[in-house]
Amino acid sequence: MPHSADCPEGRSQLFTFARRDFLQKAASAALPFLFLRPQPAAATPLNKRPSPEFAIGDLVAQDWEGDEDEDAPQFSTDFGEVVGLCYVPKKGSYLSPHVWVYYIYWTRSTSDCCSYPCFDGEPTVGSELRLVSHA
């Protein structure tokens, strides 16, 4: 049978189907995507999170010990202000789960080896900080 005999206008019938079939197939493919919503990852509910130890604007201090370097101080205290905080629900690379971390704008230190004021952007765990009355 010649090509023009199965379709009088010269078009192939291989890629055509009835309109009713088209609407049913299109609806069955599209409807699940219209009604399914992605579910958020399981998060710790707000009422089960521990309260943060510090608030933004609190003045804090961090005591630290020097390393084996002879030129470094053996003990020092850094003072700063809390400028941000974040709850860590899962175990991070070096953070334990279910802790608050704080971002500190460091204003001064008892050591002369560092330049202050500075913001290093590193999270600091609340257990390493203490509240002070001046920074």
Image: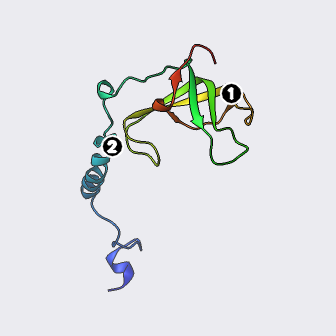
Q: Secondary structure at mark 2?
A: loop
Q: Dividing the image into 4 quarters, which one contains the N terminus?
A: bottom left
Mark 2 Cα within 10 Å, few/some/many (few <14, many 20+)? few
* Mark 1 vs 2, N-terminal side: 2
Mark 1 Cα within 10 Å, few/some/many (few <14, many 20+)? few
**Label drawn at residue 110:** 1
- Report the amino acid beneath label 1: Thr
Say if 56 sits above or below 91 in the image.
Answer: above
Residue at 29% across / 64% down in the picture?
Answer: 17
Residue 109 image position (x, y, % from top left): 68, 28
**Label drawn at residue 133:** none
Residue 28 image position (x, y, % from top left): 25, 52
Say if 83 sits above or below 94 in the image.
Answer: above
Question: Which residue is label 2 attached to?
Answer: 38
Residue 9 appears in which quarter of the rendering? bottom left
Residue at 70% across / 31% down in the picture?
Answer: 111
- Report the amino acid beneath label 2: Pro
* The one of 121 and 72 positioned closer to us in this rendering: 72
